[in-house]
Image: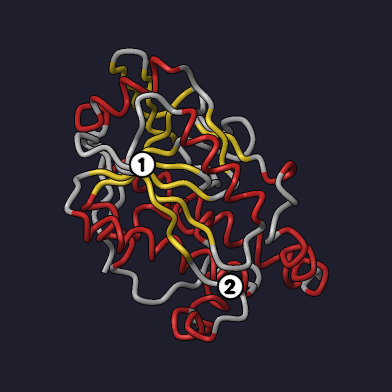
Amino acid sequence: MTNSACKLPAFVLTFDGSHPQRHESVRQQMLAFEPAIEWQFVHGFAADDSRIEDLYDDALNRRYSKRPMGRGEIAAYAGHRRMMQRFIETGHDYGLFVEDDFGWRGTAAQWHHLIGNVDTVMAGKDMLKLFDFGPPKSGCVARAECGPIETVKPLSVGAGVVGYILGRDGAKKILSRKRVFRQIDEDIKYYWELGLEIWTVRPQMIAEISAGLGGSYLEKERALIKRRHRNLATSLKGNLLALRKKVLNRHHRSKGNAGPRS
């Protein structure tokens, strides 16, 4: 579906093994959106795709993560990076990125304003998260309103990349990390490492509806990895990493900026 006047093209992450019900859900939701927006499926990677192997840095994972990444998590990160690369190639300034288990939330007025005024809404931001898992778990250090859109700069970035808006600079910053060692949901919490300016919208404007589309592809793999690494050493490491992140997060928020870390 295309609209040559669209200021915010949408990229939908899927892969060849994705359930057809997800593809149909995406098509129906895009058809229901008025006015129509420009969108495209971006086919990512399956967990058994050999092309994802060079993306994963096992050494950095052992150092900076509580548990190893599953192949599905690596594939998911690789898929988001492919969406970002596709977006950069379009020449647009901003893109809407969703996974194929997304659902629309928010009012029509909010969406129309966001799409028509995305440059204003995104001023000073690299990423605007439209979805978070669970309710907000931290306060905010800044707040901005643009028409019916309220955005906040959270004290601590939450998990969830089912839906977000990304600017060209933000995409380039994320892609500058040549190899990954955390799942993407976790990696964005360390926004300062890549100099990212991440905000979130309140209330959320995207929902995660995988339960009605055959379930999550990553849930079983993640549960298995957690069972395999459920021990005292892993728990202690997790606590130390959480404390480290909390200290670094407060340090960078107190500086008032988040310059890239070498």
Considering the numbered disc 2 on the image, is that residue within a helix, a strand or a loop? loop
Label 2 crowd (10 A; few <14 / some 14-19 / many >=20): many
Give the quarter of the image for residue 236: bottom right
37 relative to 181, above or below:
above
Q: Where does residue 193 sit, x and y in percent of width and height?
A: 35, 60
Q: Nearer the viewer, residue 118 or 37?
A: 37
- Judged by depth in the image, the label closer to the viewer, 1 or 2, is 2
Give the quarter of the image for residue 68: bottom right
Q: Is residue 210 left or right of residue 93?
A: right
Q: Nearer the viewer, residue 160 or 24?
A: 24
Answer with mark 1 or mark 2, whichever residue precedes in sequence.
2
Mark drawn on residue 165? 1
Please name the residue that numbered disc 2 is placed on.
46
The residue most toward the left is: 91
Q: Where does residue 231 sit, x and y in percent of width and height?
A: 81, 70
Residue at 44%, 79% in the rendered image:
55
Considering the numbered disc 1 on the image, is that residue within a helix, a strand or a loop? strand
For the N terminus, give its image quadrant. top left
Q: Amino acid at mark 2?
A: Ala
223 relative to 161, above or below:
below
For the C terminus, give its image quadrant. bottom left
